[in-house]
Amino acid sequence: MALQMTVPFLSSFLPNPRHRLTAHGFIPQKRISKQISCSTTTPTYSTTVPRRSGNYKPSIWDYDFVQSLVSDYKVETHATRVEKLKEDVKYLLKATDSSLTQIELIDNLHRLGVSGLFENEIKQLLCTISSDNTSIEMKEDLHAVSTRFRLLRQHGYKVSADVFNDFKDEKGGFKASLLSDRKGMLSLYEASHLAFPGETILDEARAFTSTHLMDIKENIDPILHKKVEHALDIPLHWRLEKLESRWYMDIYMREEGMNSSLLELAKLHFNFVQATFQINLRSVSRWWKDLGLGEQLSFARDRLVEGFFWAAALTPEPQFGHCREAVAKVV
């Protein structure tokens, strides 16, 4: 049987806490009552939570200034001229028989920011160029091989980096004779940035060209010098399309063999795109002004135009205006 003890049973063996133990046993003590008073205080809290200011400077893009941005270029006004220029450029793409000339023309279309106007024509040409492996100029010209390699990779074609093995010497390094081909060295440097992981030959090409381009850029043609300095600053495919096209227009108009129709088309297209960007920016600016967060959130950055610039870099094509505005609002 389990032993069970209750509280009254145990209390019979314990002394009463009100008794005092003496030599004669426990003597009852007088009960002394004391009044204890307790006071409590209720803490008060402020409903305003202080936010530390980031000390951000106000936006340099005033609302009224953004709303005043307008452009004189209208697509409807210059539509006839643009179509005429597009036909001239299409004729150039079809009339050129040289693979090198075709590649350079496609490269200029990309750099001038008008490649989107000739997507089908460029796709057909690159398909032909990708299967052309018999041309001597495409095997012995460093500029031609490098530009062909870069354009094909940019458009998703499968092209091996082994094409650059022909420019190596018996010791496995790049030939010293390439140093005199400054245009080819620049093209090889730009192509080397499209390397896949493990393509050591392109890593070697980038180290080889970057070192020597820095040494020779002071003693070359002024136009080529600007290109070398521009490329060494930031790789070509890292740059924003519209900013690159604006820079390249000033270079292309001074180059030998410049095509006036292509340059005029690039200028008109750039102005059309800029006008579209201004319309999108004014729309987003009105939304931001009506929302009022720029004035209410004093501890946060107010950077509407910078956010729109990021959105425009993500979607530079003029037909994606709604996407640009949505991305700018999220940013």
Image (cartoon, helix red, strand yellow):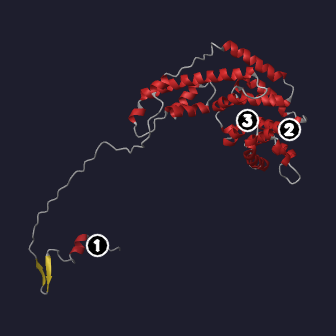
Find disc 1 in the rendering and name its residue: 5
**Type of the residue with mark 1:** Met
Q: What residue type is labelled 3?
A: Pro
Q: Where is residue 316 in the image (x, y as percent from the top left)?
A: 62, 29
CA distance separating discs 2 and 3: 22 Å
Residue 169 placement (x, y as % from top left): 87, 50
Callout 2 amino acid:
Asp
Q: Quadrant of residue 280?
A: top right
Residue labelled with disc 3: 222
Nearer to me, 329 or 85: 85
Q: How far apart are marks 1 and 3 (CA)?
A: 107 Å
x then y, percent, for residue 213: 75, 44
* Disc number lying in front (1 or 3): 3
- Residue 17 image point, x, y percent: 17, 74
Question: Is residue 245 depicted above or below 200 in this figure?
Answer: above
Q: How many marks?
A: 3
Q: How far apart are marks 2 and 1 (CA)?
A: 105 Å
